[in-house]
Amino acid sequence: MSVNNHKLEKIKNFIYQNDRLFEFLEAKICGMGEGWAEVKMTVKEKHLNAAKVCQGGVIFTLADLAFALASNSYGSLALSIKSSITFFKPAKKGDTLTAKATEINRSRKLATYHIPVHNSENELIAFFEGTVYIIGTDFIKEI
């Protein structure tokens, strides 16, 4: 099923406006298409943990936002059934983090995505993998 550009833009705007964590992270959508999405943010003071590095949950959430965009990019509601992350390097205040979700496999009811997260120097700091269950509801037809 191919999604036209107008519907893809509606999906992107709907998720961006209704997922409150975009605002908290001050994250921006850099790009999105069928089965992929890229999201960026800059690490701020409010994102740091007691060790003065970016909280792991913030990095997980950034990757999860890219995952949500990519997995819902076809217009059919898809919800996570499994997500995991491995951290390789800490992110520091001022780092720009980029999470790019890429669809690895998609069947009628399941899809799997890989989301590497890179820092400002393009170093891999974390790797997220997620699987969604595709509900199939056209959640965007109402708007």
Image (cartoon, helix red, strand yellow):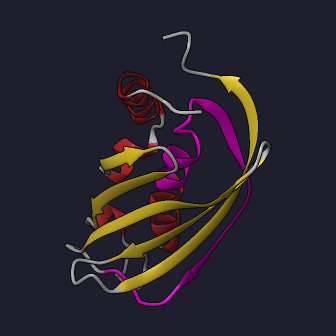
Q: Is residue 71 magenta?
A: yes
Residue drawn at (32%, 51%), measured in percent from left and top? 27
Residue 121 lies, in percent from the top left, at: 22, 84
> Could you tell me how many numbered marks the image carries?
0
Q: Where is residue 14 in the image (x, y as percent from the top left)?
A: 44, 26
Q: Quadrant of residue 6?
A: top left
Q: Is residue 106 above or below residue 69?
A: below
Q: Report the magenta residues as a range.
A: 65-91
Relative vertical location of residue 114 with respect to residue 61 in this rendering, above or below: below
- The image shows residue 12, relative to residue 54, as above or below, that is above
Q: In this view, does 20 lie to the left or right of 141?
A: left
Which image quarter is the N terminus in?
top right
Q: Is residue 67 left or right of residue 112?
A: left
- Lateral position of residue 33 relative to residue 27, left or right: right
User: Residue at left 30%, top 78%?
Assistant: 119
**For this rendering, which residue is in front, 24 or 66?**
66
Q: At 73% from the left edge and 30% from the top edge, which residue is drawn?
A: 136
Relative depth, front residue between 122 and 27: 122
Q: Percent from the top left, x then y, of residue 80?
A: 70, 50
Q: Which residue is drawn at 58% across and 82% down?
A: 86
